[in-house]
Every structure is written in structure tokens, then in C-alpha cells.
């Protein structure tokens, strides 16, 4: 969730570091800092708040000289967001500076050890402890690599680190475990970063550090070592998407740009997987024989990915006839899941670095399950550690609130449901063809939904002053209600909850008072009549209801105050179409409130701590 950059080369480091950090602002942060090595000293500047404050403090980096440095945008986990707790952290003697994403879980124990050995601390952070421990070993070993490795042996937790030494102006060190870190290769200069956008201005050649790998970065080369100190040879990969993909492209916000990109993103997800009229996923290790032996499926994810999994549960049970359980990744390890060799665990993560989800994956593997991951980032930790992986190919998503990544997860899970159903003998050739045809029409359907947004703007104008907005639905529409509610509250800060509509009479309806806004999702045809009854119930208590229904034949039949009518489409395509007006409603509501839509408060794009 924090941002890391590092540079060594022939140019002034500080301006480059600040520019790289600007490209990582989408990750969410509350303070920022840089440290540059020059003439045997480490010169640091840190500031609370937006990066603009740090730029002002340093004259856009011009006030700090040197050609080697590291930078960081921090999202607080240990200690309040302030100047002292901001990164980089420097050891007591000024020899070592460090930027760190993740958490050192045993920092308190290590801190006591260091205090006993004469160290003192100025911050409340676990990261300062890491810097001081590396300093402790460097004074004894006089070798940066050996000092970092000795310190790492004592770390418990997760970390991506950039580490500089005051007396080493020709190299710095990168280290990772569980948190993402990449190396950018330039000409006479090299970089590190926690994500690609920070590097695109300078290079497209990147290397993703593997688990517990350490890299020594020099301006003329990079040496990578594995956890056993063996040299690792790895070819760089080329970033194929252009720099404009990480910019707003003329839209006011990344979120709106990414909503508008959904037709193309969904097309990219579907098209390569339809071959000769069949769904072909290209699984390499999870064989058809293994699929036929599966007795149970777990879908494990967090946030919007979890909501996509809830929708997918209905599709997998319907078409593959396998019982499916959806679990929050943060709970999965602690429920003693009943899984084994006949269990398929599907891990969903946009970034491929979500720490709760990564730990859930490892738990599933330890218990002998087949593990399939659905991720967007090629070469990410979750992808690397899964038995098989399906990439969504959504492209870079910058806004914290996910839109196109969610939609591509959803459609890819629908394709997976069809594939599982065919392999297990429950989807015949005729049905598969119908389902493929329905999913292939989705990009055009989404384009139609995006053509006219005036109605949603008007509904947002009526709702943005509300204190509470409730969402309700039944069956698959309940899963969509959860996602609609999350989108609204995370960017508009309006209190919002989603409920299974059938639960209204079991207590929820007590929250409905005159003037309350309710969004009722009514796309699941078998339960439409029951949803209409639920709409009547809340309207009778003074609620103003917005209904989302599918097909012109349902216009005027929901009894709602306002209706959003989706184009008619097959059941399998409806969830991906239904979410679009929910995303736009959240966006325009937040816009009218004047919220920071791309960087909502207290949130981050990639959650790399438990």
C-alpha cells in the first residue's frame, strides 16, 4: 500500500525520486520522504501530508544533491502519520537509511535487543527498528549484503525494502518478502519501485524480485541473490502498455477513465479464451482429471474481489454442480478449513500482492488443495505461488476503488464456471455455445450503458446529501448490492450497507425512516416479484427507492421512485452489466460531494499488511 522508489545513476537523484513518488500517489499515503547519499553522508527530507509539501520543502528536489537515493510514501501502520514516523528511517549513527513496505511483526522484541546494545529510537515504527538492526550488523560485518541478510534472519513479517549506506555511494540494496518490489533497468542508471508507473518515464525493462531475494543495485548493473545467497540469473520483461495508460487520458479522474475502459478490458479477458466455440483457459497443472475429482470449491478473496467471488459462487454451482464456499481471506487461515486433495481453492486478487490473500493461498497449499489464482498483475506473488493462474488482463488500474479489475475478475470467473461445467459433464455443446455468445456480447452491452450517464448524474444529485444509503437484493443481486454499497462508501464517505432483501423483516427495516435512500437491485428474474414486495415495504416507511432492473418489459413494474433499466441480456452476463450503473452512481455522488475520488481517505490500492 505504501510506495517505494530508488535510484542510482548519473543524474540528480532527488528530483527523480519525487517524480517517481508522484506516479505512486494512487496507492494511498499520509506522509512522504526521500534520502540521498552524498559525500559520505545521508541527507533526508520528510513531510506529513501530500507529496506537494515535500516538493516545496526541497525545491522539487533541487536542494538535495547526490546521485543515489531512496523515497517513500507512507500509509501509517505503526505510529501516527507525522514527520517523525515518515520514511526513510535513518540509523542512530547516520550510516543506514531504509524505506519499507510491510510489517516487522517482532519489532518490539528486536527493539529491546537493540536498546540493550546502546541504540535509541525517535519514532514509533517497526521500520526504524529494521534500519537500526541492519546498522548493528553492518558495524560488525562491514559488508552491506551480509549485514542485511543477518538482520533479515531475525525479521518476522513482510517487507519490501530499499536500503542505502552512507559510505557506499556506488550501490544500494533491495530486499523483499511477501510485499512487491521491482527493479527497472536503464542505461547507466537503475531503479527500484513498488509498482511500474514510477518507472515508465525512464525504462520499460523490469525485473520482479522473487520471494526473499536480495538485489545489489549499481548504476552499471544489478546482481540478484536468492535466500541461500546463490546468484540468480533473470531476464528482464518488457512493459508493453504505454505511459498514457497510467495517466488520466482526458478524464477528470482515474476512476471514471477506468469505468469507461471496461468494454475493452472485458473484451481482452474474453476473446483469447474462446477457441473453436469452446472455453479454453490454458490451465497447465490443474488437469481435467483433477477437476472431475473436485468435491468442493473455496473462493477466497478480500473486498471487491470477494464480492466477485460471491457472484461466481452462483455460476459455479449452477453450471459445474460443485458446492462452493466463499471466505474472506483475512478469516480463512483461522477457521481450520476442511480442505484436501479434492478441494479447489480459487484465490482472487487484483494486485496479486494482497497479504491476507497470499497467506490464505499458502494455507490452502499446505493442506494439499489445488490452488488457482485470478490476478491482474503478471509475475505477482500470488501468481507465482499458485498451482495455476488466470490473468484478467485488465491493464493498469490506478484509482483505489476498483472498477475494471472487478469486472474482468467477474467475467473470467463466469468463463471458469462454464469450463468447469463442461469438463464435469454438466454443460453440453449447445449450452456452452449459448453461454459463450452471451458473454461475448458483454462489451457491447457495457458500451450502451456508458453512452448516457445523465440519468445517473441526476440520481446522484438527489442522493449526495444523504447520511445513509442502503442497498438490497436477492440471490446474485445481493452479491451485487454488496459491491454497490462498497463503491459508494469508500469514495463518498456516505454510510452505506447492503442487505439480503429477504432479511428486511428480521430487523433491518427498523433503519428505514422517511427520506432514506434505498437502491434495490432487481435483475434476477425468478425473484423479481419478491423484490417488488420488498420495495413496497421500504416505500411504506418513507424510503425513496432507486431500482435497477433488466429488460424494457420491466420498466414501470418495480414500483420504485426511480428506475434504471439495463439492456436485456442472458443471466450469465447480467452481473457484469449490473455493476456499471452502481459504479457510476458512486462516482457521481462522490463528485458532487467534492471528495478525493481516486485517493479516498484511509484507503490504499494494494493491501500488503494483515
Image: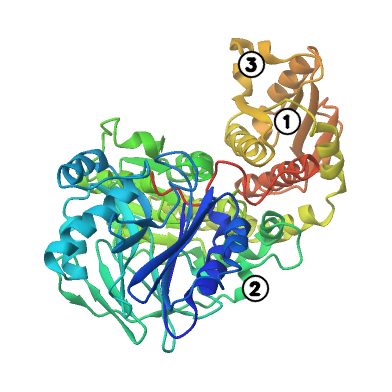
For label 2, the residue is 244
SS of the residue at dot 1? strand
Mark toward the viewer: 2 or 3:
2
* Label whose residue precedes the other's in the sequence (1 or 3): 3
Counting from the top left corner in percent of width and height, residue 561 is at 85, 27
What is the distance, in whole Å, between disc 1 and disc 3 at their CAs?
14 Å
For label 1, the residue is 519
Counting from the top left corner in percent of width and height, residue 553 is at 82, 38
* Label whose residue precedes the other's in the sequence (2 or 3): 2
* Label whose residue precedes the other's in the sequence (2 or 1): 2
For label 3, the residue is 504
Q: In this view, does 71 lie above or below 256?
A: below
Q: How many marks?
A: 3
Left/right placement of residue 364 relative to residue 534 reads left
Viewer-nearest residue: 346 or 186 = 186
Image quarter of residue 552: top right
Amino acid at each position: 500500500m505504501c510506495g517505494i522508489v530508488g535510484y542510482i545513476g548519473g543524474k540528480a537523484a532527488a528530483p527523480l525520486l519525487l517524480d517517481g513518488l508522484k506516479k505512486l500517489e494512487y496507492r494511498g499515503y499520509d506522509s512522504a520522504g526521500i534520502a540521498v547519499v552524498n559525500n559520505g553522508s545521508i541527507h533526508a527530507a520528510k513531510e506529513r501530508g501530500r507529496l506537494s509539501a515535500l516538493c516545496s520543502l526541497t525545491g522539487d528536489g533541487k536542494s538535495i544533491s547526490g546521485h543515489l537515493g531512496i523515497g517513500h510514501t507512507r500509509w501509517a501502520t505503526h505510529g501516527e502519520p507525522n514527520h517523525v514516523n515518515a520514511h526513510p528511517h535513518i540509523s542512530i549513527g547516520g550510516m543506514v537509511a531504509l524505506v519499507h513496505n510491510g510489517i516487522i511483526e517482532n519489532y518490539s522484541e528486536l527493539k529491546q535487543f537493540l536498546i540493550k546494545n546502546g541504540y535509541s529510537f525517535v519514532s514509533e515504527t517497526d521500520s526504524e527498528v529494521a534500519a537500526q538492526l541492519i546498522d548493528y550488523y553492518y558495524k560488525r560485518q562491514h559488508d552491506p549484503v551480509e549485514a542485511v541478510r543477518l538482520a533479515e534472519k531475525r525479521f518476522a513479517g513482510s517487507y519490501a525494502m530499499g536500503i542505502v549506506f552512507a559510505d557506499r555511494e556506488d550501490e544500494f540494496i533491495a530486499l523483499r518478502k511477501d510485499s512487491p518490489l521491482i527493479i527497472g533497468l536503464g542505461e547507466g542508471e537503475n531503479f527500484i519501485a513498488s509498482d511500474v508507473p514510477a518507472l515508465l518515464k525512464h525504462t520499460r525493462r523490469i525485473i520482479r524480485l522473487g520471494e526473499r531475494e536480495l538485489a545489489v543495485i549499481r548504476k552499471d548493473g544489478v546482481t540478484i541473490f536468492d535466500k541461500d545467497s546463490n546468484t540468480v540469473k533473470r531476464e528482464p520483461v518488457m512493459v508493453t502498455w504505454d505511459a498514457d495508460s497510467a495517466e488520466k487520458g482526458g478524464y477528470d479522474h482515474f476512476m471514471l477513465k477506468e469505468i469507461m475502459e471496461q468494454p475493452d478490458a472485458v473484451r481482452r479477458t474474453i476473446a483469447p479464451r474462446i477457441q473453436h466455440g469452446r472455453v479454453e483457459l490454458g490451465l497447465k497443472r490443474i488437469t481435467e482429471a483433477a477437476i472431475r475429482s473436485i468435491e468442493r470449491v473455496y473462493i477466497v478473496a478480500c473486498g471487491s474481489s470477494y464480492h466477485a467471488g460471491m457472484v461466481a459462487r452462483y455460476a459455479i454451482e449452477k453450471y459445474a454442480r460443485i458446492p462452493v464456499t466463499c471466505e474472506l481471506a483475512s478469516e480463512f487461515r483461522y477457521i481450520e478449513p476442511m480442505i484436501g486433495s479434492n478441494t479447489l481453492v480459487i484465490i482472487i486478487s487484483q494486485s496479486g500482492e494482497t497479504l491476507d490473500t497470499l497467506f490464505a493461498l499458502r494455507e490452502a497449499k499446505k493442506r494439499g488443495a489445488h490452488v488457482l489464482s485470478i490476478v491482474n498483475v503478471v509475475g505477482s506473488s500470488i501468481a507465482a505461488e499458485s498451482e495455476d493462474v488466470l490473468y484478467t488482463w485488465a491493464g493498469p488500474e490506478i484509482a483505489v476503488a476498483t472498477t475494471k479489475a472487478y469486472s474482468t475478475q467477474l467475467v473470467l470467473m463466469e468463463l471458469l464456471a462454464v469450463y468447469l461445467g463442461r469438463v464435469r459433464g454438466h454443460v453440453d455443446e449447445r449450452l456452452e455455445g449459448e453461454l459463450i455468445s452471451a458473454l461475448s456480447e458483454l462489451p457491447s452491452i457495457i458500451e450502451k450503458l456508458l453512452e448516457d450517464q445523465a440519468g445517473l448524474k441526476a440520481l446522484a444529485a438527489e442522493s449526495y446529501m444523504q447520511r445513509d444509503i442502503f442497498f438490497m437484493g436477492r440471490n446474485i443481486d445481493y452479491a451485487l448490492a454488496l459491491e454497490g454499497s462498497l463503491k459508494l462508501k469508500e469514495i463518498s464517505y456516505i454510510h452505506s450497507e447492503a442487505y439480503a432483501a429477504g432479511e428486511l423483516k428480521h430487523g433491518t427495516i427498523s433503519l428505514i425512516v422517511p427520506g432514506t435512500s434505498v437502491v434495490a437491485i432487481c435483475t434476477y428474474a425468478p425473484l423479481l416479484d419478491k423484490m417488488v414486495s420488498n420495495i413496497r415495504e421500504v416505500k411504506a416507511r418513507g424510503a425513496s427507492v432507486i431500482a435497477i432492473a433488466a429488460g424494457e418489459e420491466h420498466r414501470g413494474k418495480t414500483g420504485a421512485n426511480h428506475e434504471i433499466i439495463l439492456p436485456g441480456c442472458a443471466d450469465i452476463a447480467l452481473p457484469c452489466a449490473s455493476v456499471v450503473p452502481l459504479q457510476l452512481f458512486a462516482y457521481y455522488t462522490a463528485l458532487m460531494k467534492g471528495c478525493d475520488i481516486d485517493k479516498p481517505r484511509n484507503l490504499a490500492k494494494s493491501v500488503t499488511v494483515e
